[in-house]
Image (spheres, rainbow, N blue to C red):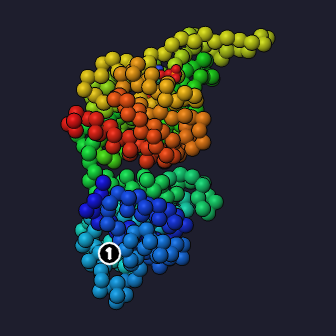
Amino acid sequence: MLQGKCVILGVTGGIAAYKAAELLRLLVKSGAEIHVVMTRSAQEFITPLTFQALSGNPVHTELFSLIQEQEIGHISLADRADLILVAPATANLIGKVANGIADDLLTTTIMATRAKVLFAPAMNSNMWENPIYQENHAKLEDLGYHFVEPAYGELACGWQGKGKLPDPQEIFNSARALLGNNDLAGKTVLVTAGPTREEIDPVRFLSNHSSGKMGYAVACAARNRGARVVLISGPVNLHEPKGVETIQVVSAREMHEAVMKMAGQADLIIKAAAVADFRPVVRGDQKVKKGSTETTTIELQRNPDILAELGQQKGSRVLIGFAAETEELLKHAREKLASKNLDMIVANDVTQEGAGFNGDTNIVRFLSADGHVEELPQMTKAEVADLLLDRATALLPQNC
Ligand code: CTP
C-alpha cells in the first residue's frame, strides 16, 4: 500500500508511547520505509530497541551523535521523508514546534522538512483543554500541519475526557490518506450505521444493541481514501466524523427515506445499520399506562427492507450488506446476499467473543456474489473497514 514511501515516525514521552509500536507494525506491514526518531523522554517509556526490531532500521535519538549524523543526519531525515508522523505527540512537542523551538532531533527534523507532518496528540484532558495548548494547536493547523484528534475515554492519569491516543489503525489511516491512497477519490460512498428506534410512545421504543462503531469505521476509512462519504446514522453515542456528511435519523422509515434520497448519488453503498424489521402499528401519543393487566401485546408492522429495495434498483452501484447472525451464519448470510441482490455481504456471528455490536473488534467473513468466502481473524473494526473497502474498490466499475 505504501511501497516506496518514507515515513519518519516521531515518538515523544507519553504513556501512550507503547502504542507507537503497534502503529509502527501497521506502517511496516504497508510496505513503507520507516525511520523512528525518539525524544529523550520517550525512551523513559519504551526502549529504542523495540522500534529498531520492528522497523529494521536504527532508531535516531541524538541531535549531535556523530555516528547517527554521519549515517543519516537530521537534514537528510527531513529531506527523504514523505511524511513525518508524531505519535504520541505531547503538549510539549506541539508547543515547541508552534513556537519555533528546535532543540532536539525530532523538533529539528520537523522544522527542516518540507514533507507533510501529522501529529497524533495524547495528553491529560486538562492539558488538552488548556488555552495555551489549543492556541499552539490552532496555529499549527493554520500553518498546514495535520492532526488526528485524540479520543475520549479513561486516561492513564485517572481523568475521564479527551486526550487518549486514538486507535493506531485510525492514525495509520490518516497517515495513509496524507500519503495519497486516494483510490476512492471522485467516488461517493453511502454508509448506514447504528440501530433504528421504533417508538411505542413518547418514552419507550424498540431497538437493538448496535453501537454504530462498524459503520462509522467504514465511513472514516472511505473518507481517508478520498471518497465523498454520506453517513446515515441511527442514534449512537459516537461523534460525527470530520469530513463526512452525516445525516441523523431515528426510525427505520426515516433511514429508508434518507437512503433513498441519497442512493442515486452513490457509487458504493455499505449498509452496516441494524435496521429494526418491525415497528409498533400504533404509537401512543401519551405514555402508555400499564393498568392492571399482567400481560400485554404490541402489534407490530413490517418496516421497509431498505437493502432489498436498493438491490432491486441496483444499476451499476456496488451494494454491500451486513448479516448479524446468532446461528447458521453462512446459510443465512448466503440467503441475504442472494435475496437482496448484493455484491457482497459481511457476515458476523454476534454471539462470538471479539465480534458483534459494542466492542472495537469484529470477526467477519466476506461472502461474494460469485460464491467466494473470505474468512478473517479477529480484527479491529477499523481494520475490517479498510479490508472491506479494498474488496469493494475492486468491484467498482472502473476496476473491472
Ligand atoms: N436491512 C435493511 N432494512 C431492513 C432490515 C435490514 O436495509 N429493514 C439491511 C441491514 O442494514 C443489513 C442487511 O439488511 O445490511 C441484513 O440485516 P439483518 O438484520 O442481518 O437481516 P434481515 O434482513 O433483517 O433478516 P433477519 O432479521 O430475518 O435476520
Question: What residue lies at 55% left-to-right and 27% top-to-bottom?
Answer: 328
From what the image shows, is residue 350 above or below residue 144?
above
Other-residue count near label 1 (Cα within 10 Å), few / some / many at <14 / 14–19 / ≥20: many
Residue 201 visible in rendering: yes
Quarter of the figure that contains the N terminus: bottom left
From what the image shows, is residue 199 above or below residue 141?
above
Horizontal relation, residue 26 to residue 82: left or right: right
Quarter of the figure that contains the C terminus: top left
Q: Amino acid at mark 1?
A: Thr
Is the residue indicated by label 1 positioned so its CB lies within 8 Å of ligand 1?
A: no
Q: How many marks?
A: 1
| x and y, in percent, of residue 155 in the image | 58, 58
Question: What residue lies at 40% left-to-right and 19% top-to-bottom?
Answer: 339
| x and y, in percent, of residue 395 in the image | 28, 35
Question: What residue lies at 38% left-to-right and 58% top-to-bottom?
Answer: 29
From what the image shows, is residue 321 above or below residue 119?
above
| Nearer to the camera, 146 or 360 | 360
Horizontal relation, residue 359 to residue 4: left or right: right
| x and y, in percent, of residue 12 in the image | 46, 71
| Nearer to the camera, 119 or 351 | 351
Residue 91 visible in rendering: no
Question: What residue lies at 61% left-to-right and 63% top-to-bottom?
Answer: 157
Q: Which residue is mark 1?
A: 109
Q: Residue furthest left?
A: 398
| Nearer to the camera, 370 or 195 | 370
Residue at disc 1, secondary structure: helix
Q: Residue furthest bottom?
A: 66
| x and y, in percent, of residue 211 in the image | 53, 37
| Nearer to the camera, 30 or 229 | 30
